[in-house]
Image (cartoon, rainbow, N blue to C red):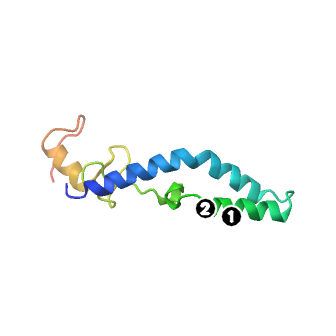
């Protein structure tokens, strides 16, 4: 559980994504609207570029909520395969029965 900072960083990114989602969607709608004049679409693209980089949803990663591990992530449980095994072996996950591992 060494990478708590990555979990915190992802939480901050999620807050930014939630805060700027409507603004980003509105600017993208203007940019993609071919009926608008070119100058207006260009101004919208400049405003979109001025928004914080971490406010884009593509900057979010699925990470284990306990360790911050980005690989082998189980979406339903929000943990990595390593923590799934540890929690399952110790009986802390309801409905998970230890088989032969």
**Does residue 66 sit above or below 43 in this rendering?**
above
**Does residue 88 sit above or below 10 in this rendering?**
above
- Is any part of residue 99 visible from this angle? no
Secondary structure of the residue carrying numbered label 1: helix
Q: Disc 1 designates what residue?
A: 46
Q: Nearer the viewer, residue 82 or 67?
A: 67
Q: Position of residue 25 (x, y in %)?
A: 66, 50
Q: Nearer the viewer, residue 81 or 19?
A: 19
Q: Residue at x 73, y 53 (%)?
A: 29
Q: Is residue 67 left or right of residue 101?
A: right
Q: Disc 2 designates what residue?
A: 50
3D distance between C-alphas at marks 2 and 1: 6 Å
Q: Nearer the viewer, residue 69 or 2?
A: 2
Q: Is residue 92 left or right of residue 29?
A: left
Q: Position of residue 93 (x, y in %)?
A: 22, 38
Please report contact status of discs 2 and 1: CB closer than 8 Å, yes or no.
yes
In the rendered image, which quarter contains the C terminus? bottom left
Q: Quadrant of residue 19?
A: top right
Residue 73's label in the rendered image is none
Mark 2 Cα shell of 10 Å, populated few (<14), some (14-19), many (≥20): few
Q: Is residue 50 left or right of residue 16?
A: right
Secondary structure of the residue carrying numbered label 2: helix
Q: Residue at x 82, y 64 (%)?
A: 39
Q: Position of residue 95 (x, y in %)?
A: 25, 35
Q: Is residue 21 left or right of residue 75?
A: right
Q: Residue at x 48, y 60 (%)?
A: 59
Q: Residue at x 16, y 49 (%)?
A: 86
């Amino acid at each position: 559980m060494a990478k708590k900072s990555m979990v915190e960083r992802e939480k901050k990114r999620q807050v930014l994504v939630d805060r700027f989602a409507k603004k980003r969607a509105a600017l993208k709608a203007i940019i993609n609207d071919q009926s608008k004049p070119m100058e207006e679409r260009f101004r919208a693209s400049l405003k979109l570029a001025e928004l914080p980089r971490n406010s884009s949803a593509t900057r979010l990663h699925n990470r284990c909520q306990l360790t911050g591990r980005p690989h082998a992530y189980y979406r339903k449980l929000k943990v990595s395969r390593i923590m799934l095994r540890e929690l399952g072996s110790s009986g802390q996950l309801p409905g998970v029965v230890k088989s032969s591992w």
